[in-house]
Amino acid sequence: MVPRRPRSLSEAPAGGAGRRLVAPRAVLGLLGGIGAVLGLGEPALAHGGGPGVPEWQQSLGDLAVLGLALVVALVLGGNALAPLLRGVPRRRLLALSLVPAVLLAWMLSLLARGTVGRVLFPEPPPPEYRSARAERGGAVATAQGYHVELSRSGDELRLWLSDSYRRPIEPAHFAGTLEVRGRALPLEERAGHRFARAPGAGGEVTATLEVPGGTLRIRWSLGPGGRVRALEPFEPGGPPPSREG
Amino acid sequence: MEFSRFLASVHPALVHFPIALLFAAVALDLYALARRDERAGWAGQALLVAGTVGAMFSFVTGGFAEIWAARAYLPQDPMEQHEGLATLTSWSFIGLVAFRSFLTPTSNPRLFRLYLLLAGLGLVALGATGMQGGRLVYEYAAGVQGVKPPFMATAEDLAVLSQSNTPDELYYSEIMHHIFGWMVLALAAWLLYQDLGLPHVDRIRALGPVALTAGGIFLMIFSDFDSWPLSDLKPVTDREVLAHKVIATLMILVGAGASLARRQVGGQVSRLQNHLIAVLALAGSGILFTHVHTTAPYSDTAMGVYFHHMTLGTAALVAGGVKMLDLSIPEGHRLWSRLWIFMLFLISALLLMYNEGIPWYLGGPGV
């Protein structure tokens, strides 16, 4: 007898005595889950993935995404593995499920800690938060939540802007001038920072920066030997620094 | 770029679909339960699916709107709140669609009541999302032309705007997409081989679980290049890393289990598994539509990723729809089966041509 072509992918050829195969659908389902996992790789986390407490709405969103994906994966996988467990004695079944149950509980606790836990129990800010550490050999001052570092290289005065966590801000997002000996020099754009040429500059230098939220004014003192010192490193009345540079 | 602006401008129009359809869906299901009306139940389920699909397209166009609003120096916190609520809403309804697909108003009233309770909570999330979206326009002037926004970007917002991906990150992401493109291509070819009833189909069928196990091992090692075992920069308990390792473990276990199970006499595949595959395709498309680029979220790379994911998500949605049709109209099984395979070939092609940036079909550099 010539076997009929199987009607569906799960049906064995006619000679198989009605045996059906777990393989095709399990494979289909789990490979379909691969696409889910690739998307899981970056769920809707806090934008920029940086420090700071995420919004509670984001954490709930994360929990929904990760939780549902976990449920679907477990249900699919469990259904695929179910034939293996048919006929296994109850006591043995309970013993077998103990390890995955513990693993699952641990995973769920990590999930909770990584989402709503971050909102309910926020971590302290990292050491970079409001830090006066000079990263480019200059001097750092803060104003309105920004860190501004001014350094001197020969005749050039260079200025770097970053946020309260010292994450850099591209020069395209701010503009301004450096006032040196009564002259306002425009700050030109270069990769990662702005600069102005001020040959023989000394004494007090004032940066006036236009940012989307307003105007920043910061003062430095230029000393001999290329030394730069911030005159008001931290804006008065603001939160204290986490660590001095 | 202009196309992305267009998609951003379409967001306020598209949001009406999930709002109207999902409320109507739940109302119809409520009526169906009260009056034991199967027709109302069918209509409710149809509207639920349509509303959820609408939510997905609303989400992805919202991603474009967010990029352009952030580049106009609007503060990012309120946008993130809106996005978080939209994620909660979208995923709640994806889960509800899956749950609802197993229910009718008359078969299991207790479970149906549970579904309605959860759907009600989903509607609360939907309402909160809409309210926050309205605040973005009325209080923050998001998308309003010719006015200076009352609140501007903070230092942290500018730092996020300044972020970009390193070439290593971009290359790694592209490679992973291409590798899985080859895997999906192999899967599609494997299915086509069986569907055509070619020689030694029984042996070929056995390759599936083996490939699954191999894919799981690959994912376990290479899913995150900045985490164990390739680096110790990120711990394995990080939630992104953990999610990858969980699925990798599951792939290995199920692949090995499937290989063992197929040797058992009477090892059966349930109709439930077929149903779950359709659900998984829907979940996969949902993930693609709601995927948010967390590193450098406002870069051109992020914009390109949204284009790619919208295309892939639509393909996955169609694939899931085909599987659902296979379940509900089994007479057309041969057609649905071939369509499913075709969609997998299409998805594999999209993955193989994936690039981290504007897609080639929109004028980007391509692979």
Image: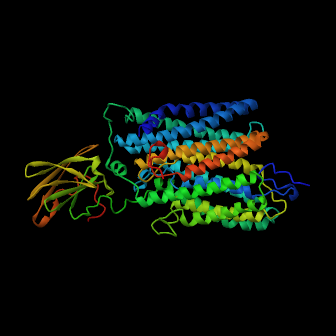
Residue B109 in which image quadrant: top right
Quadrant where the image shows the N terminus of chain A: bottom right
Residue A95 in which image quadrant: bottom right
Q: Give the color scheme: rainbow, by chain, secondary structure or one colour.
A: rainbow
Residue depicted at 78% across the width and 41% down the height: B330
Total labels: the figure holds: 0
The answer, for residue A103, to whether it is visible in the render is no
Quadrant where the image shows the C terminus of chain A: bottom left
Image location (x, y in percent) of residue A168: 31, 55
Image location (x, y in percent) of residue A48: 41, 52
- Give B256 or B41, whichever is nearer the viewer: B256
Left or right, B347 with reference to B334? left
Q: Residue furthest front?
A: B199
Residue depicted at 52% across the width and 70% down the height: B229
Residue A219 in which image quadrant: bottom left
- Give B248 or A191, whichever is nearer the viewer: A191
Is B225 placed above or below A24 here? below
